[in-house]
Image (cartoon, helix red, strand yellow):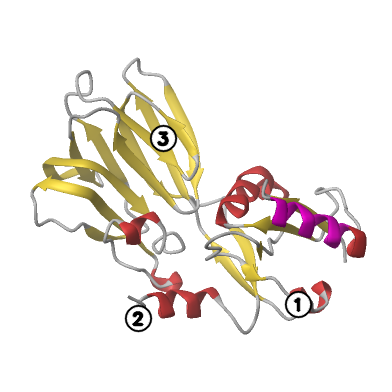
């Protein structure tokens, strides 16, 4: 079995990568059987963006601070761990954004797409679901759309709902909503198309971020589940991501 190892920039992750390469050798990603990100969730997300078109499975090893999407570091044989792992398919979000000069940006997000104010002023948004206006004005710091895999990340910190992986739902969650103050967001079918329009975009600047890729001075964003960019992540059979998501709902 051939592996391609990639690590975050921490000394622990770099040291672990060197040990793995000494034990299992380093293969070019194009011929590797599995991509092995070493670090935290950030390096896994970066690897998904960098290598997803190769159609390889990913087995992350946690040497970061959270590592929700990673497997615990282990002294067990790596090939045995991967052969006995459970494969989970992730469907990312497809984001299309337009800035105030009508320049168009496209990106994908495995965790979430988030819109955030760029200044001291609160943002104002209009939200459409499948071309129907569902909220004519949301005043807040920002708003995000999360996948089920990303629902325990930024979405949870913004008090959004945790979604089981097989729910086929997206979480639409406001960030520090001011008006309507009691609105806590919505759960939407992954078949829906979400269009978020920035009101007064000239005066109330807004950025949009798809995972770790940011675009600024945005006036309109369209988000929907991607139909052709799915990826496979491998999890230790004794610590599946379904178990992690379930456990997260009972921790406080």
Residue that numbered label 2 is attached to:
250
Task: Single out the mark in the foreground, 1 or 2.
Answer: 2
Question: Magenta residues?
Answer: 11-21
Q: How packed is label 3: few (under 14 Cα within 10 Å), some, or many (20 or more)?
A: some
Main SS class of the magenta portion in the image: helix
Res. 207 mark:
none
Residue that numbered label 3 is attached to:
96
Q: Check the picture and name the quadrant holding the C terminus.
A: bottom left
SS state under label 1? helix
Q: Residue at x 41, y 50 (%)?
A: 112
x and y, in percent, of residue 90 in the image: 53, 61
- Cα separation between marks 3 and 2: 35 Å
Residue 110 in the magenta stretch? The answer is no
Of mark 1 and mark 2, the one earlier in the sequence is: 1
Out of 238 and 165, give the one closest to the viewer.
238
- Cα separation between marks 3 and 1: 38 Å
Of mark 3 and mark 2, the one earlier in the sequence is: 3
SS state under label 3? strand
Q: Check the picture and name the quadrant holding the N terminus.
A: bottom right
Res. 81 mark:
1
Q: Residue at x 39, y 45 (%)?
A: 113
Task: Single out the mark in the foreground, 3 or 2.
Answer: 2
x and y, in percent, of residue 55 in the image: 70, 54
Asked if the residue under mark 2 is in contact with the one under mark 1, i.e. CB atoms within 8 Å, the reply is: no
């Amino acid at each position: 079995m051939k592996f391609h190892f990639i690590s975050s920039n921490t000394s622990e992750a770099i040291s672990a990568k060197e040990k793995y390469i000494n034990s299992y050798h380093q293969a070019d990603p194009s011929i590797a059987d599995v991509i092995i990100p070493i670090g935290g969730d950030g390096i896994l997300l970066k690897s998904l963006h960098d290598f997803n078109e190769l159609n390889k499975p990913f087995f992350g090893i946690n040497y970061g601070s959270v590592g929700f999407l990673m497997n615990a570091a282990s002294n067990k044989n790596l090939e045995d761990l991967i052969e006995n792992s459970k494969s989970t398919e992730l469907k990312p979000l497809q984001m299309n954004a337009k800035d105030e000069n009508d320049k168009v940006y496209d990106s994908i997000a495995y965790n979430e797409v988030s819109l955030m104010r760029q200044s001291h002023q609160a943002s104002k948004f209009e939200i459409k679901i499948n071309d129907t206006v569902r909220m004519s004005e949301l005043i807040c710091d920002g708003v995000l759309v999360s996948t089920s895999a990303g629902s325990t990340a930024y979405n949870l910190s913004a008090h959004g709902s945790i979604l089981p992986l097989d729910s086929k739902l997206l979480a639409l969650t406001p960030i520090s909503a001011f008006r309507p103050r009691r609105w806590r967001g919505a759960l939407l079918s992954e078949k829906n198309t979400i269009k978020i329009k920035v009101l007064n975009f000239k005066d109330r600047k807004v950025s949009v971020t798809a995972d770790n890729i940011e675009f600024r001075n945005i006036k309109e964003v369209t988000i929907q589940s991607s139909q052709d960019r799915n990826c496979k992540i491998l999890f230790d059979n004794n610590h599946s991501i379904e178990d992690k998501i379930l456990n997260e709902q009972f921790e406080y």
